[in-house]
Image (cartoon, coloured by chain):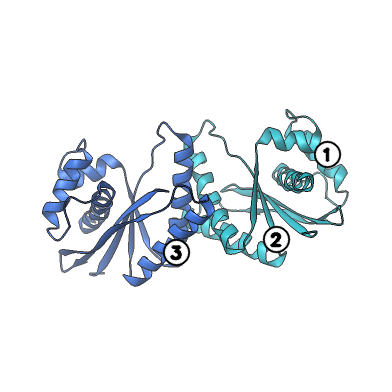
Chain colours: A cyan, B blue
Amino acid sequence: MNNKIFLGIDPGLHISGFGILKKEHNKTFLLESGFLKMNPTHPLPNRVRKFHDYFDQKISAFSITDLSLETPFLGKNAQNFLKLGYLRGILYLLSTKHSLVIHEFSPREIKQTVTGFGGASKEQVARVMVQFFPGLKSPDKLDVTDALAISLCGLWQQKRL
Amino acid sequence: MNNKIFLGIDPGLHISGFGILKKEHNKTFLLESGFLKMNPTHPLPNRVRKFHDYFDQKISAFSITDLSLETPFLGKNAQNFLKLGYLRGILYLLSTKHSLVIHEFSPREIKQTVTGFGGASKEQVARVMVQFFPGLKSPDKLDVTDALAISLCGLWQQKRL
């Protein structure tokens, strides 16, 4: 299993950042990064569908083998937590359709892995990502650099196993 | 729109009760009720997929037009709340695929509508359901009678509009 292609996603019903990384002969390549923006005024079912179709297509187009996610924590808003569940359900469905291996990490673990400091800010994570991937347009959305960090964490943890 | 076919679901990652009701010329018919049981030791993505495929098939087989759901509330277990989100995300996805109208009610509203008392117990709801639908094997799982009540609530509220 030398060629692994990791999709890292930071899902949201407004902005979902993503980063696609390829590991080849111990080198890491950035294949694509970006975000899906959805209109918060659109009905939830339509946004859930859009999220499904968008990542279904990305997974096929890039022959993704691994999906990397952040463990969700209940914040102040229980409804947002539930809505995050909608999108994770979709990702689980897609993982079975495309036979993806799922990796999940706590936010702290991701920050520790990519910056060396578990308490790093989103801005610090973004700076490290820009250093790793000079092709990344800077400054990018923090949702995108967050997703890249999730993807990179999956890829590195994989390497260690 | 005289012929409406309501699917009421009480989703769960272990047991999901459902009830399918048809409204024809102001009469209500029970088409099917039952539950999907999933093995709690199976990986979450597989259960999410099984839930998707099971209800995808039911919706097609019964030409469902309307989906009736209970508003979820955050209980003591935040992880269960999140997992409920997975299944709701799947139902949203299916609603767009099959052009279903979604109806959502609070637990209180459902109990009030079907028993006349918002604080009714699950057992009371079950007894009323058995009276309404004598074909229902009694005693049935409370997940099934709950789902039937959700379905019936949607169908009745619909009639009022």
Is residue B108 among what the camera can see? Answer: yes
Q: Residues within 10 Å of mark 1 (few under 14, many from 20)?
A: some
Q: Where's the N terminus of chain B, which quadrant?
A: bottom left
Q: Secondary structure at mark 2?
A: loop
**Which residue corresponds to the image point at 57% horizontal and 60% vertical from the top-left?**
A96
Q: Is residue A139 left or right of residue A9?
A: right
Q: CA distance from mark 1 to mark 2?
A: 24 Å
Disc 3 marks which residue? B53
| A122 over B135 or under it: above or below | above
Q: Which is more N-terminal, label 2 or label 1?
A: 2
Q: Nearer the viewer, residue A134 or A137?
A: A134
Q: Residues within 10 Å of mark 2 (few under 14, many from 20)?
A: many
Q: Is residue A99 left or right of residue B138?
A: right
Disc 2 marks which residue? A64
Disc 1 marks which residue? A128
Q: Secondary structure at mark 3?
A: helix
